[in-house]
Amino acid sequence: MNVQALLPLPVVIPIVGAIGALLVGRLHRLLPLLVGIGAMAVSLGVLLLIATQVLAGHGQVITTYLSDEQPFRGRALGIAFSADPFGIVVALLAAALGAVLLTSALSELGHLGRRELGLLACLSLLMLAGVIGSALTDDLVNLFVWFEVAGLASFGLTGFFLEQPTALEAAFKATVLTSIGGFVIFAGSAMLYALTGALNFGQLQHALPGAASRGTSVAVALVVCGYAIKAGLVPFHAWLPDAHAAGPGAVSAMFSAVLVDLGVVGLVRMLICTRTVLPRLDDLLLGLGITSAVVGALLALAQDDLKRLLAWDTVSQAGIIVVGFASNDAEGISGAVYHLANHGLFKALLFLSAGAVLHATGLGKLSELGGLWRRRRVLTAGFTVGALAISGVPPLNGYASLGLIHQGVADDPVVHVLALTAQVLTVAALARATYLGFYRPRAQEYEHLETQHIGMRIGLGSLAIGCAAFGVLPTLIVPRIAAPAASFVLHTSAHAAGATAGVSTVPALSIPAGLSGGTDLVTSLGEIIAGILLAAAYIRWGEPRPVGWLRRLHTGSVNDYATFAVAGILLVSVTLLA
């Protein structure tokens, strides 16, 4: 089956669904969300058809040009959609999680009126379309367009409950910081076009070696910084915890499990395009990633608000994923692809659980919670599975993907030790949250607990099953999904050939599907024990002084956060120019 003609459909379907969601609310209050679920289910079905060809054999790159504007003499013309083994993973994840999370929203937000539910479904579908479009687009300008589509929709979702001052403030911070990101992406893309005459990713790979200059370094730095803002990497990160904690549970889950991937996509595309011209970019992203992993996990451990804790952990997990991609190692990159999917599953599960806690109790602070395991066993089980998965407990999904990333950076002792440290801090943060929120005895019983509806149970159950399935099937996932994606990232010629020829084959890449026996198991066990001991010490003795200093550095002022971003842009630019 020729799937090239299908490539635009996974983006078009959610956009049409977004329009439909606004219209059908007049007929029935819940119809907008049902339309949204249907649109994402159909989009997922189309993506699965495309994936059967993209992931066939060792992997393929499939490209189609709108309006039949085919490449001429090696130059790409017009708007192109391209499906490759890396992008298809991101697109599939966005569509699948979108359908699950909209199903959960039926229960969590079903009490809202027709107008509110129509707007919620519309904005959610537009944001998901933006993420899928970013995964399937094949040029810098359209990647920027999808960045803006997803960003504008996310602003509305962040400030959806305008009567809550924290939501409005978070939306303002997200607007300011991601607007800075959008500006530098556009400026950098314009500079690259002026220097190379190319915007298509495949064509850029051919054009950049002949145009290597200080201007090229600055242009790449600007684009990288823009997508680092969306990915929430330190020092571009400070807006993310506010934005990801402000919305309803299902919306927060979409932000952390799906929207962050857009930033990762942009960074990986730039890595692929510039690896031969700017090898320092790997080291730069390795530094940004590992710093984000440690800082994010440390600040997650310091949080009392459950959703803010999970949002800070997203900063850490995004950093670990970027470390894997920047490792320039087959195992590290395959682990990053695997962990990107795994993070989507367990972070969506954790945020849905946090949203369900807030829905049931009206409370969101760990200091106010406790004892939920007696009254909400399904909810407690869901959060516990997510916490175990993100902690790397075998046989859940985090164990295999984290192990591959750690193997990928094993030759760099500093990065390896810091990655293990970040994982210990992550275990501590989630162990503390799980105990305080669910298993710690509570002095007083809750006066009232809202009913947990079927949509929430479906969401929690399906995501927990996903965490278990992705954990016990590495022998299927690594060779058939992660390895082709890693080969695509490493062998940049496949992308260039696919852009100009329409179809190209990714070189074969063999990666062990399982981890190397007892060593990895002992390492994981050591991380878990150290994390639990650290959590116990934190609960008993409180916050260490250095953590307090780091926490107070994040003042909540949008002016300070914009200053962090500008300083980061200067740092990245100087590093690539050196």
Image: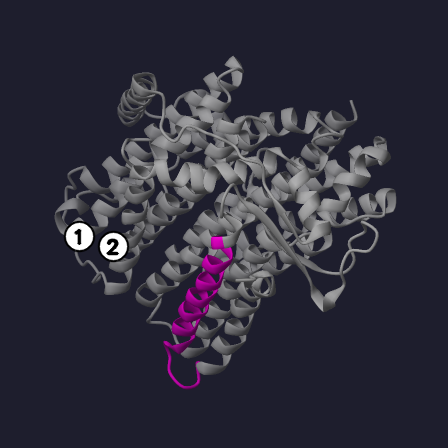
Assess whether mark 1 and mark 2 are in contact (beta carbons under 8 angstroms): yes
Report, in whole angstroms, how far the alpha carbon at label 2 lies from the one at label 1. 7 Å
Q: Residue at x 83, y 44 (%)?
A: 191
Front-lying residue, 77 or 218: 77
State the image coordinates of residue 43 (x, y, percent, origin top left).
48, 64
Question: Residue 218 vs residue 433: left or right?
Answer: right
Residue 292: in sight, yes or no?
no
The amino acid type of the residue labelled 1 equals: Tyr
Q: Residue at x 83, y 32 (%)?
A: 212
Determine if the magenta segment contains residue 51. yes
* Residue linked to disc 1: 446
Determine if the magenta segment contains residue 488. no
Q: Residue at x 77, y 47 (%)?
A: 189
* Residue linked to disc 2: 361
Q: Magenta span covers which residues?
A: 25-52
Going from N to C along the chain, the mark reached first, 2 or 1, is: 2
Q: How many marks?
A: 2
